């Protein structure tokens, strides 16, 4: 058994919680009126469920015990990003004209190494997986090439683990921020990731088991693409023929985000092209 496969949901959850606290500014722009509205509606929805479904005290106490365990395991980022974030993302990007966005997920870490295109993501000498050449162009909605655009990419390894969230993996393994050339072109050499299950040995896994759900996410690349004067886009790209495209536990797959890689000319790997289109930054 490799070191990384000894990762626990609690350890991963604690890392996700710590990084969320360190990297996100929360609450400062939410008005009292908005908190009152949203909290009241959320509580009403829960109360309505209790009355409509005739929830018993045994079920209520099971819920309380489970909510306590979510906190103890540090899995609130995982829970919210898996089951709620997709709806928030749809609201946030409803008016976007360019490329489709989707969820960020709990395993993003800012500050990845800056790499000039063509680039190869940091990886271990014995990293498993099929070599993947991922390339394309970054433009604005008016088809102007965005020179020097940043294509920030991160993804799981062949066993479904993310660097900085599982032991035994180098800090920036399979993470990087690639700078596009003067024509907005980027080229990234990495490995095609595999499908994986979200952590199942913690509170979220307990819910999945109790509800009879599956824990699978289809294989995907995470990306944040940005350029001066344009809106950053956060997205994920998936792969054809993945059996979990239609039942992703995180409900994050969109048809526009599915890639169809082809074998490289020398037969040593696969390659695929994807062009990112960015909206202009909002003006006051």
Image (cartoon, rainbow, N blue to C red):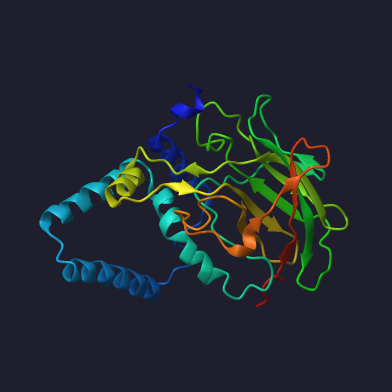
In the figure, residue 131 lies in which quadrant?
top right
Give the tally of numbered discs. 0
**Residue 228's spot in the image, x, y percent?**
75, 62
Q: Residue at x 29, y 52 (%)?
A: 211
Q: Judge by depth and name the residue closer to the eye, 149 or 50.
A: 50
| Residue at point 38%, 72% (across, down) | 32
Picture layout, residue 50 above or below residue 24: below
* Frontmost residue, 161 versus 150: 161
The percent position of residue 83, horizontal first and vertical second, equals 41, 57
Query: How far across and how far down the image is residue 65, in percent?
Result: 21, 47
Of all residues, the one furthest to the right in this rendering is 182
Instruction: Return the residue found at the far left.
Output: 57
> Relative to 156, does residue 181 appear above or below in the rendering?
below
For residue 38, above or below residue 66: below
Residue displayed at 54% across by 58% down: 103
Q: Quadrant of the C terminus?
A: bottom right
Taking the view exactly as shown, the residue that stands out farthest to the bottom is: 284
In the image: residue 68, left or right of residue 30: left
Image spot of residue 185 (x, y percent): 83, 54
| Residue 79 located left or right of residue 190 | left
């Amino acid at each position: 058994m490799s070191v990384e496969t000894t990762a626990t949901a609690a350890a991963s959850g604690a890392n996700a919680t710590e990084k969320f606290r360190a990297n996100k500014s929360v609450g400062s722009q939410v008005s009292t009126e908005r908190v009152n509205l949203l909290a009241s509606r959320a509580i009403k929805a829960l109360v309505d469920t209790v009355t409509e479904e005739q929830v018993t005290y045994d079920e209520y106490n099971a819920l309380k015990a489970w909510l306590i365990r979510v906190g103890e395991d540090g899995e609130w980022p995982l829970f919210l990003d898996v089951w709620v974030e997709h709806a928030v993302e749809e609201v946030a990007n409803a008016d976007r004209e360019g490329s489709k966005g989707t969820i960020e997920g709990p395993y993003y870490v800012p500050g990845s190494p800056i790499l000039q295109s063509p680039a190869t993501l940091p990886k271990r000498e014995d990293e498993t997986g099929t070599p993947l050449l991922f390339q394309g162009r970054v433009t604005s909605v008016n088809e102007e090439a965005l020179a020097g655009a940043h294509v920030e990419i991160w993804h799981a390894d062949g066993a479904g683990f993310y660097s900085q969230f599982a032991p035994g993996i180098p800090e920036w393994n399979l993470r990087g921020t690639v700078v596009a050339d003067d024509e907005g072109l980027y080229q990234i050499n990495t490995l095609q990731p595999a499908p994986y299950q979200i952590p199942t040995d913690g509170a979220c896994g307990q819910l999945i088991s109790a509800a009879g759900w599956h824990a699978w996410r289809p294989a995907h690349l995470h990306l944040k693409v940005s350029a001066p004067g344009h809106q950053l886009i956060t997205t994920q790209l998936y792969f054809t023929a993945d059996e979990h495209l239609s039942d992703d536990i995180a409900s994050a797959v969109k048809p526009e985000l599915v890639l169809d890689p082809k074998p490289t000319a020398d037969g040593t790997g696969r390659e695929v092209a994807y062009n990112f289109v960015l909206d202009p930054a909002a003006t006051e």
